[in-house]
Amino acid sequence: MLREQGEGEPALVLLSGLGDPAAWWWTVPVPGEARPHWRGLEGETRPGIAPALARWTRVAACDRAGTGNSPPPAHPHTWTDVYAELDVVLDTLRASRPPVLVGHSLGGMIASTYARRRPGRVGGLVLLDPTPPPLTAPPPVPLPEPLALTSFGPEEVAPGVLGDLPLLLIAPERPATPAEAPGRTQAQLDARFRTRHARHLEWLTLSGRSRAVWVDHPGHYVHLERPEIVIGAVRAFWENLP
């Protein structure tokens, strides 16, 4: 079921991370609601970024099959199925301008690879600490949503593959510390950050019209942990679209 708020174009279509419900765009989950995906934020319930984005344009999101309020699919969804779901969302909007896809984590990977396959259907990309397209097969572990993911080829990260599609990447600028990410050494956290940051820099070469905003916070959920930075960056990006 598609949830919408606000008016205006181009619309912002919000794509959640692996296993995350679309409701998190509207309300930040507390720890009991967020785990095991995320630690959540202590204290009173607070709004997510969708209501703020909807002050100046139309915002839409829905749960992928098997997440949130969506029933599980008859079989684990392939990339083709995921793109078909997104086709239906964009068709339902009936927008006169191609919308901007705002994707977090896996949602960022979906947004980017979809834009490569559907040129003309996407007006821009906002990638929130996106998961870089895998060049090898994913590990054989249970996923928090029913997906049958397969590996991508290097063409997904070929320089210029998205032409001049406006692209904004927002991600942490530093690694976490062991106090922020218990159970890992600083060396492990540094290595993970270096690898991910290098892939993000590679991602910026996909479009001739890309830029990055680096956040001084190591959390993966940048839109929930630093919403003011994300909201401001998305608005500036949206206002400067061609």
Image: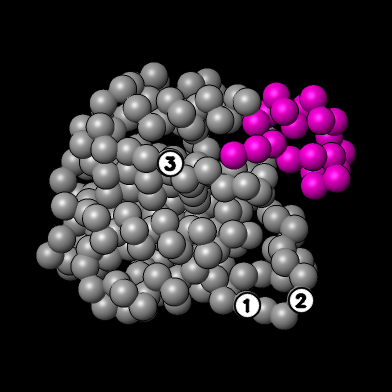
Q: Which residue is mark 3?
A: 212
The residue furthest left is 96
Q: Is residue 189 magenta?
A: yes
Q: Residue at x 21, y 32 (%)?
A: 163
Give the CA separation, mark 2 to mark 3.
31 Å
Residue type at mark 3? Ala
Q: Main secondary structure of the magenta part?
A: loop
Amino acid tagged 1: Arg
Q: Residues within 10 Å of mark 3 (few under 14, many from 20)?
A: some
Q: Is residue 178 left or right of residue 25?
A: right
Judge depth for marks 1 and 3 and give the one in front: 3
Left or right position of 212 against 174: left
Which element is circle 1 on? strand
Q: On the image, numbered disc 2 is attached to which residue? A: 43
In this image, 164 relative to 131: left or right? left
Q: Earlier in the sequence, mark 1 or mark 3?
A: 1
